[in-house]
Amino acid sequence: MPLPVTMTETLLQSTRDYVRHTLSGEGTGHDWWHIQRVTKTALYICDRENADPVIVELAALLHDIDDWKFSGDVTAGASAARAWLEQNNAPDTTTDAVVQIIERLSYKGGFETRPMTSLEGKIVQDADRLDALGPVGIARTFAYGGAKHRLIHDPDHSPESHADFESFKAAEGTTINHFYEKLFKLKDTLHTATAKQIGEKLHRYIERYIADFYAQWDGRFDSL
């Protein structure tokens, strides 16, 4: 049974406050402002795809709590989300729907074994991946690379072809290689028509950026 409107808004506001407090100041591009952007984008898509906005917003808000890229545990995020929702008396159906989304949300190098099934999950996953593209995605990529002490570019090291998720998870290549190992692949993983339309534009932006990066790197200024 869904919560009354006032209780739903209380849960949403408490979750916003909790996530903002938890992730403020995070320096890898997975901070509160990433969460806020993903939530706004997810609700934008949700409105056009006729999904449940409460499930969408809760999953978007909680999707990077205890992210595996930092905890090393691929189950930690879903467990933390479940604990928060249960602590705040969310309905079991809401909690289960949100946790299932978070369990399946993260990009795992193309080695995802549990595809996203719900429309709400597809929307949140699309919104998260759109935030890894375009000008914001570029900024986040270099923030993450800097936080991980990665080189910007090394022409002697080509992008890696990962054999499995463990290989992808352990990769420590350059930031430019990350464009090839992840970012350029994201457009083709988008689910909704709304996200695909946005993704095409943001994908072209990072393609132009990489072409200009190499032109400046190589001193081909007439190509800029």
Image (cartoon, rainbow, N blue to C red):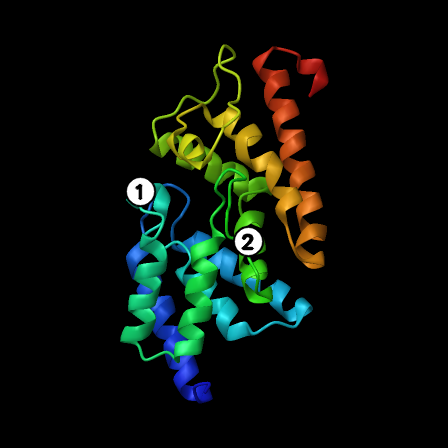
- Residue 37 placement (x, y as % from top left): 50, 56
Residue furthest front as drawn = 113
**Helix, strand or loop for disc 2:** loop
Q: Is residue 58 visible?
A: no
**In 3D space, how far apart are the residues under numbered discs 1 and 2 (Cα atoms)?**
21 Å
- Quadrant (top left, top right, bottom left, bottom right) of the N terminus: bottom left
In this image, 69 relative to 219: left or right?
Answer: left
Looking at the image, residue 18 sits to the left or right of residue 167; the answer is: left
Q: Nearer the viewer, residue 136 or 70?
A: 70
Dot 2 amino acid type: Pro
Where 111 falls versus 11 (above or below)?
above
Q: Is any atom of residue 69 visible in this view?
A: yes
Q: Which residue is under mark 2? A: 115
Q: Earlier in the sequence, mark 1 or mark 2?
A: 1
Mark 1: which amino acid? Answer: Gly
Residue that mark 1 sits on: 72
Horizontal and vertical percent position of residue 220? 66, 12
Asked whether disc 1 touches disc 2, contact meaning CB atoms under 8 Å apart, the reply is no
Give the residue at x 66% y 37%. Answer: 205
Neighbour class for label 1 at 10 Å: few (<14), some, many (≥20)? few
Identity of the residue drawn at 50% across and 44% down: 107
Q: Position of residue 5 (x, y in %)?
A: 46, 87
Considering the image in quadrants, where does the C terminus appear? top right
Residue 18 in the image: above or below residue 54: above
Quarter location, residue 86: bottom left
Q: Residue 32 location in percent, x, y?
A: 39, 55
User: In the image shown, does 168 or 142 lie closer to the viewer?
Assistant: 168
**Residue placed most toward the observer, 157 or 34:** 157
